[in-house]
Image: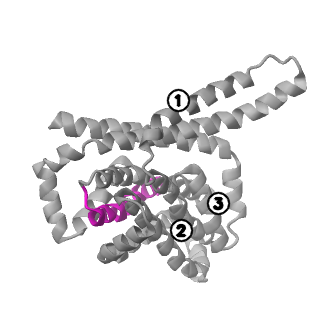
Amino acid sequence: MIRDLLFPVIYGLVIFLAGMKLMEAALAKLAGPLLVNSLHKATSTPLKGLIASSLLSALLQSSTAVTVLTIGMVNAGLLNYARTLGIILGSNIGTCLTTELIGLQISSAAAPLLTLSLCLWAAAVMLGELPPLHLRAAEACRRISAPVQFISLAVAGFALVLWGISVMQSIGPALQSSGLFRWFLDHAATSTLWGLAAGACLTAMVHSSAAVIGMAMGLAASGTLPPELGIAIVLGANIGTCVTAVIASIGGSPSGSFVAWSHVVLNVGGALLFLPFTGPLQSLAAWIGGGPAAQLAHAQTIFNVVCSLAALPLCYLPLWSRLEKRLQS
């Protein structure tokens, strides 16, 4: 049972997290100073901050990266607390792109996609090291080589994410025969709080909501996990992802701590608000289309978009500017 259950989970999770980190690092290098400059310039209003943060989170494929960066900028005095509210809301929207792509169930494309991206990366490296027979041509090759390298590595990271999901999905039959999982399903049938707690705890441990949601999507696709319970796990994952931001705020300024705890309040409040409506949410996700895995991806997107847009008007209250002045005095 350990060989059939534990090893594929650990193996698949390692591959998944390695792919996420590779994709995040490559896209961060590709974005370069645009990341900090865009966050600083595009936060004059909460709506602009939400849009900019959504785009940057989609580019980096990590809401945590954007939130932690924001805390760092607040601690450094580059942003005030009132300007960060839109960024916090937008970061949750942008990160939904990963789960929507995973929901397409294109795991079979992982191997060819990985091979193609690595070949493209190798070609870009060789292009950047061509002998300078002509100075202008060599400079043009170097300018093209770096972005292509980062893009190909980001694609390779996404291929690893798909591969990790495929490995974790293979535990479906062994999990169904596990008495512990049957015990969990029986208790979860009486209260979706079990699913919420499982999603929050697992995400807090692995520091990646995408990994936990991806695992839930794999189990849902194999028929092991009921979609409604999977949605509760998705809501819990959105709570667990706040842990990294809270840790990043330790030892920083009061404004930085407020950024982290605002993220906690948004995600915890939204999850508890949506938890009684996992049934209607699953029905709406099923109406949008796709199998069980796609339904979890749609539920994640609906949850984050609705919560962020509902909270956006509150960001315009003058209370936050007054609070900022009191924290600084």
Inter-mark Cα distance, 1 to 2: 36 Å
- Taking the magenta stretch, the answer to whether it contains residue 296 is no
| Numbered disc 2: secondary structure | helix
Q: Quadrant of the N terminus?
A: top left
Give SS at disc 3: loop
Three-letter code for the amino acid on which mark 3 is drawn: Gly
* Image coords of residue 323 (percent x, y): 56, 77
Q: Residues within 10 Å of mark 1 (few under 14, many from 20)?
A: few
The circle drawn on residue 89 is 2
Relative horizontal placement of residue 161, taking residue 127 as reference (left or right)? left
Up-down relation of residue 23 to residue 70 (above or below): above
Identify residue for label 1. 115
Residue 134 position, x and y percent, is 89, 20
Which quadrant does the C terminus fall into? bottom right
Question: Which region of the structure is painted magenta?
Answer: 225-249
Q: Are marks 3 and 2 in contact (CB under 8 Å)?
A: no
The answer to whether marks 1 and 2 mark residues whose Cβ atoms lie closer than 8 Å is no
When the figure is inspected, residue 178 is found, relative to residue 88, above or below; the finding is: above
Kindly identify the amino acid type of the residue bearing the numbered disc 2: Leu
Q: Would you name the residue on which mark 3 appears? A: 77
In this rendering, does residue 289 appear at all? Answer: yes
Q: Amino acid at mark 1?
A: Thr
Q: Residue at x 45, y 53 (%)?
A: 104
Label total for image: 3
